Amino acid sequence: MGVCTVGDYLLRRLQEIGVRHVFGVPGDYQLEFLDQVEAMDGIDWVGNCNELNAAYAADGYGRLNGIAALVTTFGVGELSALNGVAGAYAESVPVVSIVGTPATFVVEGKQKVHHTAGDGDFTRAAKCAGEYTVAQAILTRDNAASEIDRVLRFCWLLKRPVYIMVPSDVAYETIEAPADPLALLEPSSDPRKLEKFAGRARDALRAARSVAVLVGPEVDRYHLAGQLMELAERIACPVACLSNAKGVFPEDHDQFIGGYAGKLSDAYVRESIENADCLLALGTQFTDSVTGGFSQNIDPSRVIALHPTGAAVGNTQYAHVSMKDALLALAGTGVHKPSAITSLLQRRARGQAYEPVRSARLVQERFWEQFQAFLEPGDVVIADQGTAYYGCAELALPHDCTFVGQPLWGSIGYTLPALLGTMLAAPGRRHILLIGDGSFQLTAQELSTLLRNGLHPVIILINNDGYTVERCILGADASYNNIATWRYDRLVEAFDPQDLAVTAKANTEDTLAAAFAAARSNRDRLVFVEAVMERLDAPESLVKLGKAFATADYHHAPVS
């Protein structure tokens, strides 16, 4: 690169690894850096309504783009964003959190400046960030190039957020920048341990009468869907997914049998996964929200487990074996275990095609049938925590669809700003958001950012009069689960002075059909559909999960 400023060096390195948009909110400690952002060809500034929404947007962008960047100001800005950064940490999304800080001499002099506690301690926010990032750096003129490269490598390698502090007097300092491209790191394997794992796994596969594959989110985070497909097709066994890996394996594939969620699973899926002599658990995390409250019944001695930097065959662990190398090794074993498979699409084809019933009130069960018919190949489907997520978990996604949710961190309201991120990461695809009214009220203002950026998603707001997901756990009729009644169509109008949106309100099957028809014919406009349902109407899986959570959290009667 030759001689350049610290800020330009950081931005060029971000460009190298695929960042084309930077999210955030301006603040007085990073305004000069934002001047550099705006001057940088190939990177666009995306201003958000608040820092939390910016972090959520970066998370959504990182999931589809592979990595994302976020800029906030010291103290008040970065702490506002921290919940979103923590969610990216929990869900393994690489986000580069860049914080503009007071000038070096201000920090060294312990001056009592704004956005601090007034005691000269400038480390508090950084300590908080350190709990939810895998690498941190405070840039100086002397260390900027090496520290930026180090931190970005960790972000890419570990698929988690990192934290870079840029003092306000450092962004425009000039440095001698390396000419070589940034060498990104990938998980690697110890050859001897990989060989031992492959031999043990081959023996387990050959001895098994039945084999099944269970897919987890780490396959997606490490971009290994192609290797997964090769392995599954060579073995010719049934494939299921956890809900947080939905769509990673094509759901229209002849080997795909559906989603696995412990006791909440379809009986055929549950039997195929839990009774397999050998289960390949690929990048799985058995968290409460995706297992029906830890209701999985999987014998660890029958499992071959792969994770980004380690593997296991039964109870024998193999450290320093990368998931990519392990997948290739398993595919190379030559094991072929074909079995009779009734795919998800075959089972669904036995039912009747959906037809809306005129004037019939919207109910969850029928709504999801209608939404299933609305989906198209290539869609990006984003579902907020609650009825939206667990309804989507039961869908059969068309070919090349992507599913985005946040079941582990579970911060309601995440998905509306995340939609902004996914749309900027993949602008050529149709993006559909499903979000409850309670979740929407937390982050509603980011609707204006979608409109300001000329984006055209389909937003389906499930209006069930409050926090239905919480009502399923406790307080079905409690006032704390109530929310204010909003005129959602008027809200869209207020955010849309240029008349870029189409709105519809549906409380019957035929009015929802009309709204979906309007969405199909208005692909160049934002379409906002309010779907009205009863407050206690929820997918059966969410009702059962709520009972399981109540048991775990409050020792109530166990779920039947």
Image: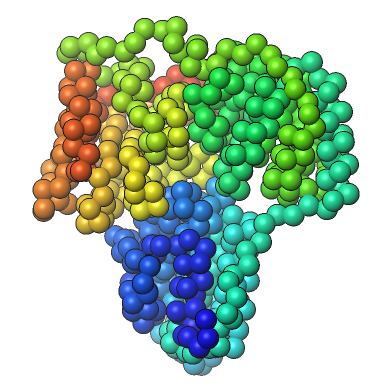
- Indicate how the structure is coloured in the image: rainbow
Q: Is residue 342 visible?
A: yes
Q: Position of residue 460 (x, y in %)?
A: 28, 34
Residue at image position (31%, 25%) is: 374
The number of callouts visible is 0
- Give the answer, above or below, for where 367 lies relative to 415: above
In the figure, is residue 97 to the left or right of 306? left
**Quadrant of the drawing holding the C terminus:** top right
Q: Is residue 31 visible?
A: no
Q: Position of residue 239 (x, y in %)?
A: 62, 25
Question: Which is more toward the observer, 553 or 270?
Answer: 270
Q: Position of residue 317 (x, y in %)?
A: 83, 42
- Give the answer, above or below, for where 124 lies relative to 467: below
Q: Quadrant of residue 435?
A: top left
In the figure, is residue 460 to the left or right of 548? left
In the figure, is residue 472 to the left or right of 212? left
- Give the answer, above or below, for where 330 lies relative to 258: below
Residue at image position (46%, 53%) is: 65
Question: Which is more toward the observer, 441 or 121?
Answer: 441
Question: Which is more toward the observer, 429 or 356?
Answer: 429
Q: Position of residue 285 (x, y in %)?
A: 64, 38
Residue at image position (38%, 26%) is: 476
Residue at image position (49%, 24%) is: 252
- Give the answer, above or below, for where 156 lies relative to 504: below
